[in-house]
Amino acid sequence: MRLRLPSSALDRAAWALLCLFVFSIPWEKSVWVHGIGTISRLLGIVAFAAGAAVAFRRRAIRPPNIALVLAGIFVLWSALTYGWSLDRPATRVRVITLVELFAMLWLVWDSCRGPLRQRRLIEAYVLGAVTGSCVAFVRYIHDLQTYYRRYAAPGFDPNDFGLVLALSIPLSLYLALGGSGKMRWCWRAATLIVISAVLLTASRTALIATFIAFSFALWTWRRADLSQRVSCVLLVALLALGLLRFAPAPSRQRLATIPSEISRGTFHGRAEIWKSGARAWKSHPVRGVGSGAYPEAVRPWLGRPNVPGIQYVAHNTFLSVLVECGVIGFGVYALLLGALFVFVWLMPPPERALWAVMLAVWAAGVSTLTWEHYKPTWLMFALIMTEWARSWWLTGKGE
């Protein structure tokens, strides 16, 4: 029997806080709160407290799904690695982060139970990506480089920021596909703003992810009307023209090195980091070196970077999980991803197209980034869970 959310001021306030939290994720590092961290961390704490109060008042929580259980097991195993970690302070920090992310996962799962709420969270993320893009434009206008003639929202690495933006593209195209009236063009305009900001990051990983993101248009081509088809073609054309002419010259020059980096197999120095990680894993294959301890594990081969405050990270989410959590933790993480893939496969179109493309964009991006402890990763996991449940398990009308 489907539980109905209580119609109350507390519930509305909790939902508004959750939407605000999701909206802040794409630009969270641009605003810091003293003693707490990013603005999204503060909003997440408040949203979780409000959501927990709603659940307490309801005197029931939503039954967990298999992916949620596997995510909990992964967090638990990461915490257990503290006992043998090569860097216990780093493991402690990572585990705290993972616990907070699991709380976010549960909050979205428990709060988002209908098509309207699912759409609102998607809209919140896209609007957050547009906001972050506009901040990057301002920095470009004032020539506030993140580094090496590359631009991102304050506090972000350009590669991370580029993937944050690329993940919003299938979402905005999905909103345009199912929208009505002028709002459809607003979501298409949002896509144009985001791809322009991706070019400013000069992130090769983000650019590849962006092109993958537009496969959503191909997947839903038959379902789309003429305006959707034409707008998607124009957006891809503008992205290509940006690479050839419109983007700043340093960005174009860096992005043009993608074929050479792939052919040489160095991936801008990441290959040596990956080899060192493989060596570290061979010494601790089953239990791993400890969650968050990758920099310490590869220090015998790589030493420490010359730049103060910088550490060698895995630059590959799957390798990072394998080295830090061993075969056991990696197996749980793989099962989690497998469960999410099954959820997507069971969805009706065009939701199946949306979340399959989202997983593809994410997988391409995190192949060169360390994202197992990033909010966009866990938010995507949460939205896949809620979409699956809405479509097939607890189907019903309402919010």
Image (cartoon, rainbow, N blue to C red):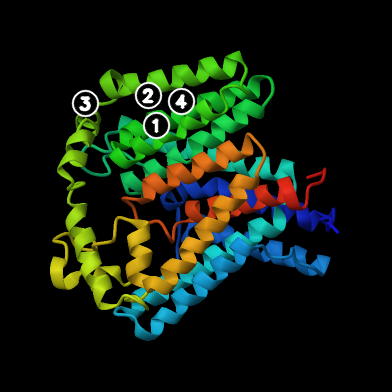
Mark 3 or 2: in front is: 2
Q: Choose the circle earlier in sequence order: 4 or 2.
A: 4
User: On residue 239, which mark appears?
Assistant: 2
Distance between the alpha carbons at the discs numbered 4 and 2: 8 Å
Mark 4 or 2: in front is: 2
Q: Which residue is mark 3?
A: 249
* Residues at circles 1 and 2 in contact by the CB criterion of under 8 Å: yes
Q: Say if 53 sits above or below 201 in the image.
A: below
The residue at 43%/38% (across/down) is 166
Distance between the alpha carbons at the discs numbered 1 and 3: 20 Å
- Other-residue count near label 1 (Cα within 10 Å), few / some / many at <14 / 14–19 / ≥20: some
Q: Which residue is mark 1?
A: 211
User: For the residue marked with disc 4, what is the amino acid?
Assistant: Leu
The residue at 82%/43% (across/down) is 397
Helix, strand or loop under label 2: helix
Q: Choose the circle earlier in sequence order: 1 or 2.
A: 1
